[in-house]
Image (spheres, rainbow, N blue to C red):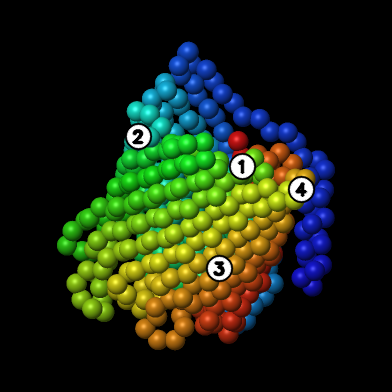
Amino acid sequence: MKSSKIALMAGVAAGLLASAPSWAGAKLKIDDESMIDLGFRVQSLVIQREVDLDGDGSWDDDTDFRVRRARLRAKLNVNQYVSAFIQTEAADDAGGTGSDMRVIDSWVNLMYNNWLQLQSGQTMAPSSRQTTTSSGAMLTIDRPGINTKNLTWGTRSTYRFATSTLSQTDAGLRGDNAVRDVGAVLWGTGSFSDTMHLKYYAGMFDGVQDADTDDNNLRFTGRVQFNMFDAEPGYYNLSTYLGTKKTLGFGASYDMQDEVAINTVGGGNADYEFWSVDAFLEWPLGPGYLTAEAAYSDLDLDRFDADAAAAQGNGWYVQAGYYINKWQPWVEYEEWDGDAFSGDFGNYSQYRVGVSYFFKGHNANVKLGYEYTDPDENFSGTTEDDTNTIVLGFYTTY
């Protein structure tokens, strides 16, 4: 049954590839120094999943269509030192935000030079490699489920290719601004030589400001990234460069905020702490290019209640792909070990495999993927202890 569904989705993908249009953006020149760059991003998914539709505690087959991301953006380059960016989104995601239009990015960037820049406004907190990776250039269908363990995305894990929250891994702790945070980041990037490059971030954000605690403390986030051979310049990285780079990178991130919740178990207030280390490789291999990325993360919430205990812990992921002649097969594995008070709640592993076809690089591509999710305890409210998901995704960005 699964093989027939995969074949059907592959056929749909092939038909769309044959009729794929070309894509273009728009740049409006204001004067000799100033310019507005207009763009968009649309990611549409067809999801074949297992879900309890009738409430009997067992899985039923279900096909779901979802707009994962639909964004309009505008960047204003005032001159070589000042720029501004605004991005809206109407999309369904694992947080259940619905499809109402909202502003997710709005910031001003001041640049003294490449090594010294200040970005202020609503932006992505640099708490891991994935939070500094563009959603328009992901290796698989979406980000690893472990990626949402940081405060920006809700101290939880996701499954079904990041379209559902794995409830037994959810601490229920959210920052005040969904999927982004408001604050300022001092950052910079530069090279020591042709083959040695550094990028750093140091941020201060609102984080959680509505907790029933004594103080509203700020959130502090930092990241450092070192690349050999080719650099990864700019605020955001890519998860695959499609054979345009030869680089080996290592990064480390730290994210913390004091007194984010009441500790209902030990008394007093609970603190948030998240850190990660990561590695990235894009390398020529035979007739194509190998891409690989891995990260280890640790989340500490002082086990302020049973949900927080199951959500916190540590885990890792690894993903790899091979790009050749516009095709890129890929695989991914991740696992998380929670600190539940009893049992194995919060523990899980996930396997993903798929293939992507790029008919105009990251501007236009299609991806087909399969995911197997295996929690150590049954899914909440069911008698099921694993689930399968197949996703066909269509991606455009400019």
Tag 4 residue: 287
- What distance separates the C-alpha of mark 1 from that of mark 2? 24 Å
> Secondary structure beneath disc 2?
strand
Of pointers 3 and 4, the one earlier in the residue sequence:
4
As rendered, which of 394 and 324 lies closer to the eye?
Answer: 324
- What distance separates the C-alpha of mark 2 from that of mark 3? 35 Å
Q: In the image, what residue occupies the spot 65% across and 65% down?
A: 352
Residue 116 shows which numbered tag? Answer: 2
As rendered, which of 203 and 158 lies closer to the eye?
Answer: 203
- What distance separates the C-alpha of mark 1 from that of mark 3? 26 Å
Q: In the image, what residue occupies the spot 70% across and 54% down?
A: 322
Q: Amino acid at mark 1?
A: Lys
Tag 3 residue: 334
Tag 1 residue: 245
The mark tally for this picture is 4
- What distance separates the C-alpha of mark 4 from that of mark 2? 39 Å
One can see residue 129 in this view: yes
- Residue 373: horizontal and vertical position, in percent? 60, 73
- Residue 220: horizontal and vertical position, in percent? 30, 52
- What distance separates the C-alpha of mark 3 from that of mark 4? 28 Å
**Residue furthest top in the image:** 32
State left or right for residue 86 relative to residue 219: right
Of pointers 4 and 2, the one earlier in the residue sequence:
2
State left or right for residue 174 relative to residue 289: left
Q: Are marks 3 and 4 in contact (CB under 8 Å)?
A: no
Of pointers 1 and 4, the one earlier in the residue sequence:
1
Number of other residues with Cα within 10 Å of mark 3, as a class: few under 14, some 14 to 19, many 20 or more: many
- Residue 72: horizontal and vertical position, in percent? 54, 37
Number of other residues with Cα within 10 Å of mark 2, as a class: few under 14, some 14 to 19, many 20 or more: some
Number of other residues with Cα within 10 Å of mark 1, as a class: few under 14, some 14 to 19, many 20 or more: some
